[in-house]
Image (spheres, rainbow, N blue to C red):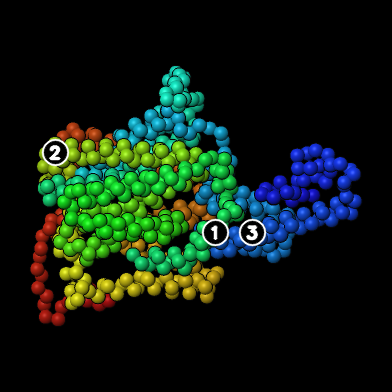
Amino acid sequence: MPLNIPFLREKAQASPTENTVGEPIDHAITTSSSEKENAMSTGIEASDVEANRKLDLYRRTHKWDPNLGDDTLDEIATVTALNDSNAQSKVIDRVIDNSPYPEVRAAVRNYDEDLPASTFRAWTIGMFLTTIGSGLNSLFSLRAPAIIITSVVALLVSYPIGVAWAKIIPARTFNIFGLKWNTNPGPFNVKEHVLIVVMANASFGNGVAYFTDTIQALKAFYHTDYAVVTHTALFHGKHIWTVIRDSRGELDDVHTRMMRKYKNAPWWWYITLLAVCVALCLVTALAWPTHLTWWALLLALFISLVMTIPIGVVQATTNIQLGLNVFTEYIIGYMLPGRPLAMMLFKTYGYITMVQALSFVQDLKLGHYMKVPPRSLFWGQLVATMWSCMVQLCVQIWALDNIADICQPHQSNRFTCPQGRVFFGASVIWGVIGPARMFSGNALYSSLQYFWIVGALSPLLFYALARIFPRSNARFLSAPVIFGSVLYIPPATPLNYFAWCMVGFVFQKFIRNRFRGWWMRFNYITSASLDAGLAISTIVVIAAINLTGSKFPSWWGNTGSMETLDNLGEAIRQPLAEGETFGPPTW
């Protein structure tokens, strides 16, 4: 019997009496029955060896994968050691012909449907929602607290629009410059839906574009980490190198193999886009009095280039993205002190280039799982991003010129520009004052420089523990996650962390382990519903109260935090009695 191994079926299904195209073999040149049996035996043994090798490669590649359970790795080790053909076939069907992660299996099908993606309907709905979402996010970013409309709203709103389009709009075929398109290509399908969501993600999925903070700071106020690198090199360096060298595609999962039927976006598209963007960056920095030198701009882009893969690996395994904002502020503050505008541009290029790259990769991964052609994804992301930039810029300029008392603390509708204010403060601290006055020589915070060494060496300790105790929980320790989590304090408080831990434990630990079926079917639907409900209710509240000139109801939940000494900006002096110290009397 030939082995039932999908990636070996073409070799295993050859008949001893037929050639590879099913034609009978001339009996004058056929071999004896014993030779046939030997040949079949040799073929099966070769298949066993190939399956063993591939499973062993898979196990070694995913050795440090924190999201892959020990039971899967143990099962692979057992079947490869026993050389059990049937067991190998089952493991390959489950792990290689499907995703080994239950999170992926719960949301992604392991087969492809021949459906159109880049349709006139998808582009029209996608660009419409891109315009609305980008404009609202740009306007709401001026408000405190800021409101973010995520792509989940586009996900939910686009579906009934697409279904209604399929039922109402008549089907007409047009041919413009050799490009044929139909106003109604049939039922609204999942690939069109994914392309719309990708456009929303690229344009406003993470809130307002970062460059708008610079506009706010200039117009309203000026009026005119090493642990991640070490951790990635130790825990994932071998995996990254193995993937780079995998020219034969032996590590490709089932979704990658199905995507081979679509044409990839050629490299020259990306290289051309890179060249155009770098040229525009140089023109922006050098043609106007930004005080940012050309070499500083190239250094900012180089920082993003180097840090994208390490930070992307951490984000892919932990869903936590580490920021480069403070790091880039620190670097430019030393290189070009006293240049606040140069600091803002350097931070934007050095930080947001990496953020946008990972955001685009995230959307490409979504399209990869949903089998959307890569070329459609490329143009969907590019066009939506360019259009949203223009929309957000226009909304920002209109709001800054037409809303009374905008960016002032007493603004009636709370359009106080919190993000622009933070950006302005950072430009003063890191650009005008500069880090040299705070961290160099005998400065007050000079001792903090030693934490560069702590950040670089701490993954070595965790890696040593994981090597000594490979079956313990020590292999789940991640220095980038531990240190990166404290970046949110302030403004995050213990209450924020408690809510995060509580929700994560209930859904990702308790329900996932005890009620796996419910978790696989409803967990992500529940998460999307909560996000969408918050966004939609926020829009309703803004429309019903703020835009009608009414005052928001006051109660302890939204007034208590506004009455603290910190929020009121009051400085106090409290003399200590003799022998008294700050903090509790005993620790």
Q: Amino acid at mark 1?
A: Arg
Q: Position of residue 11 (x, y in %)?
A: 73, 49
The local crowd at label 1, few if under 14, some if 14 to 19, many if 20 or more residues have their Cα within 10 Å, is few
Which residue, as the protein is rendered here, is positioned at the far bottom? 579
Give the residue drawn at x 38%, y 33%: 126
Residues under labels 3 and 2: Cα distance?
63 Å
Q: Which residue is mark 2?
A: 401
Q: Which mark is residue 245?
A: 1
**Circle nearer the N terminus (1, 2):** 1
| Residue 560 visible within the image | no
In terms of sequence position, does the residue under pointer 1 or pointer 3 come before the other? 3
The kind of residue tagged 2 is Asp
Amino acid type, callout 3: Leu
Q: Residue 203 in the image: x percent, y percent?
A: 34, 41
Q: Which residue is mark 3?
A: 55
Q: Residues within 10 Å of mark 2 (few under 14, many from 20)?
A: few
